Amino acid sequence: MQVRLEKIVVLGTGGTIAGLAGDPAHSRHYVAAQKPVADLLGGVAVPAGSEVLSEQVAQVDSKDIDLAVWQRLLLRCQYWLAQDDVRGVVITHGTDTLEETALLLQSVLAPAKPVVLTCAMRPANAPDADGPRNLADALQVAACVGAQGVIVVCAGQIHAAAEVQKVHTSRLDAFGSGDAGPLGRIGPDGMQLAREWPRCGKAWSAPDVQALAARTAWPRVEVVYSHALASGALVDALLDAEVTRRLGVPPVQGLVVAGTGNGTVHHALHDALQRAAAAGVHVVRATRCAAGGVSSTGEEAFPDSRGLSPAKARVALMLSLLPGQRARRD
Ligand code: SIN
């Protein structure tokens, strides 16, 4: 009797995991996004009962992710997740914006199957390349019965999309989940979960995802930073219609302020943000601090980011500003 294998689809997008160093002995000097995803899978253990397919969705350094890449990735995830014989999806991704892509996919697809993003801090031809281990771990997580939601696997740690954040510029374990801690761990002794898999939440309808993937622009949301000696000049420049026209960019619809401490904002910047809000711009307060989030008393002029970092709050605000998404925002 032939056993029906469940498929795990690996979508390649680039990053250091696909990077190559000119001289592997000096692997700090490398170019990201070189090696095809099919080649990354060579020699990586396939979980029992699974068959692994791969597809190259993009080949970029994730600092350069653009709308087209996100739109393609959304569509390919949507397509593969809808196939009955697909157990889960793994995405190879650069570490630098991985948390933004993870939040986007979780917010829009809210998948009932696992979508596991993985990455590396060393290029593929470095003597201490960490990509193969991370990819093998990601495949195991994708094959795990009960796994669901958008998950990040790096350096033996399993994180949820909502909490994960890059916290170190060079260490192999470059990600953390702040106060929540990782969802679990995976290593030679198998997988240990500390908490439940992320709840699926409400996914966008298939036509809404298609429409999102077809939009030529998403709402423009910028991040500004509060700091000692801050002024409101940057906010005023962002709202200046003449600057917008000259640069050929859409008008700003949202601003995330990376506030100090518990989301506090320098008074000069705060005044400028109030002018922006009066002009119809949606302002959200996040924090520069790596952990702790922002708690509100209800007296503040601007809502807080509900625990999201500034980069992720930008993604959430951008999605909420899309036509028809008001209900999700309120
Ligand atoms: C990238 O984010 O694509 C490059 C850096 C990395 O993957 O660590």
Image (cartoon, helix red, strand yellow):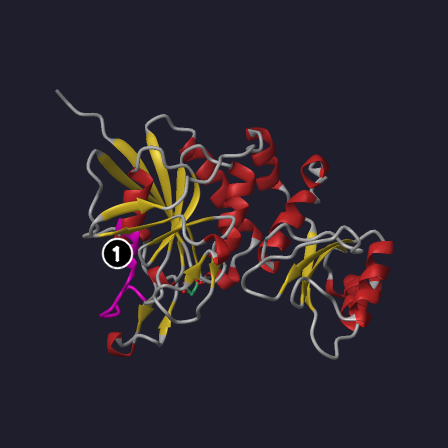
Residue 134 is left or right of residue 109, and the answer is left
Q: Quick check: can you spot residue 69? A: no
Residue 43 is left or right of residue 167, and the answer is left
Q: Quadrant of the C terminus?
A: top right
Find residue 23 and report its image quarter.
Answer: bottom left
Residue 167, above or below 317: below
- The answer to whether residue 219 is magenta is no
Q: Could you tell me which residue is drawn at 58 percent across and 33 percent down?
A: 204
Residue 10 is left or right of residue 165, and the answer is left
Q: Quick check: can you spot residue 114? A: yes
Measuring from the top left, give residue 248's x and y in whole percent.
73, 60
Q: Could you tell me which residue is drawn at 61 percent across and 40 percent down?
A: 212
Residue 114 is left or right of residue 140, and the answer is right
Residue 206, above or below 20: above
Measuring from the top left, give residue 206's x and y in whole percent.
55, 30
**Element carrying mark 1:** helix
Q: Could you tell me which residue is drawn at 15 percent across and 23 percent down?
A: 2
Callout 1 crowding tier (Cα within 10 Å): few <14, some 14–19, many ≥20:
some
Q: Could you tell me which residue is drawn at 20 percent across and 52 percent down?
A: 188
In depth, the one of 195 and 46 nearer the eye is 195
In depth, the one of 302 and 93 nearer the eye is 302
Residue 256, above or below 104: below
Measuring from the top left, give residue 168's x and y in whole percent.
44, 68
Q: Which residue matches tag 1?
A: 133
Magenta stretch, residue numbers:
123-136
Count of residue discs: 1
Measuring from the top left, give residue 288's x and y in whole percent.
61, 66
Question: Amino acid under label 1?
Answer: Arg
- The answer to whether residue 129 is magenta is yes
Image-quarter location of ligand 1:
bottom left
